[in-house]
Image: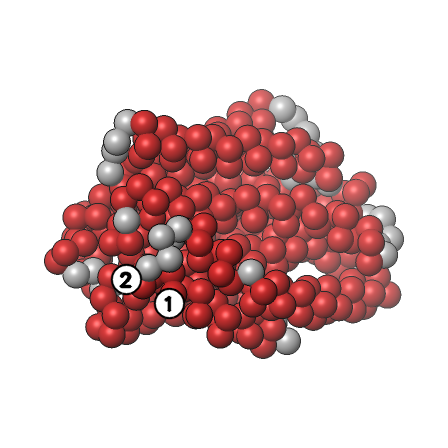
Amino acid sequence: MSQSISQKFTPISLLKFALPSMVMMMFMSCYTIVDGIFISRYLGSEALSAANIVYPVFNLLLAVGIMFATGGSAVVSKKLGEGKKEEAMEDFSFLTAVGVALSVLLMIATLLFHNQISLFLGSSERILDYCNAYLIYLVLFAPACMLQSLYQSFLSQQETASWLVLTVIAGLANAFFDYFFLAVCGMEIEGAAIATGIGQMIPAVVGTVYFFFFKGELHFVPFHFHGATLKQSCFNGSSEMVSNLANAIITYLFNIILMRIAGENGVAAITIILYAQFLFNSLYLGFSIGVAPVIGFQYGAKNRDQLKSLYKICNCFVIASSVVIAFFSWLLSDGIASIFVPDRGETYVMASEGLRIFALSFFVQRI
């Protein structure tokens, strides 16, 4: 990792370095989006509404994972920049263990109180069974989801290329099993949840084997509890965590309000809009994950000129990409809606019109 992130970065080389992480995060977001497409087409708008109603639980899981991924990789990279390789490996092992432990706690709490959680998040009695089934089966794979988020942040540039291929394979597996379980086997919404879990398990298992048995620059080692490392990682990754928690709160409020105003069709429409937001936001999350080790290393090496250059490059990328994304989300609003709702009914109309309005937020929230 240290050799690749110690180079002097230009705008092109930094984007090239962060590109695999950006693509991987977009593929990870596609797990949920592909679920939504198959759920909507094979089970209908009510099932799609249910998937979105319980999704704030997974926003919470992703928020924690991304916090440790971005914040932890910055801490580890800083120590690599300072030449403290043993400490870096111990911190990596410790943060991975903490992330998995938190995901297990979330999984247990959700399994115990899934019905109460679904009702609290806005489920109607009509779709409560859909909400519970999707929530239960998807949360069983919470540790795999956590590991997938963590591993991709701690890979070197050479390893990232292989991880990108693995992520693509996992995404294709998710799509295949979505089709197989829903279209071929005739399963209900739990089939989509299991398909997503299989997609998450592939990189989680491969990554665990790699970091245990292949002694690369980072690998698992015995560790002790490091409160300072945990605190610094949480602080470094807090902005990304807050962004995901904000998405969870926004999703919850949208669902509550639209369930009252437009019922399940209204929730299905906002689900399509939020899927588009989720996909585009994953681009920025991937960029953050990609550049965090670079910034951490340069900070550890006390290279202030390079840090200033990196800051300018990141700002320019965010501003330029936000304009492009806002334009294309407005332009493609009808096409995005039709992917989920080909019959062009009430849900389609609300989703396509809503996307045109919501497109402005892709520009405003980033600027």
Visible in this render: residue 100? no
Which disc is residue 116 wearing? none
Label 2 crowd (10 A; few <14 / some 14-19 / many >=20): many
Residue 258: horizontal and vertical position, in percent? 28, 70
| Depth check, front residue: 83 or 8 | 8
* Residue type at tag 2: Asn
Give me the residue at 28% from left, 62% from top.
Answer: 265
Disc 2: which residue: 265
Visible in this render: residue 191? yes
Residue 287: horizontal and vertical position, in percent? 65, 55
Residue lying at the far top in this picture: please name it: 213
Label 1 crowd (10 A; few <14 / some 14-19 / many >=20): many
Residue 362: image quadrant is bottom right
- Quadrant including the N terminus: top right
Where disc 2 sits, the SS reads helix
Q: CA distance from mark 1 to mark 2?
A: 9 Å
Left-right relation of 21 to 345: right
Contact (Cβ within 8 Å) of mark 1 with mark 2: yes
Give me the residue at 58% from left, 65% from top.
Answer: 331
Left-right relation of 106 to 290: left
* Residue type at tag 1: Met
Where disc 1 sits, the SS reads helix
Left-right relation of 9 to 51: right
Disc 1: which residue: 350
| Depth check, front residue: 197 or 299 | 197
Residue 141: image quadrant is top left
- Quadrant including the C terminus: bottom right
| Depth check, front residue: 30 or 184 | 184
Mark 1 and mark 2 lie on one chain; the one further toward the N terminus is: 2
Residue 202: horizontal and vertical position, in percent? 48, 30
Residue 14: horizontal and vertical position, in percent? 78, 53
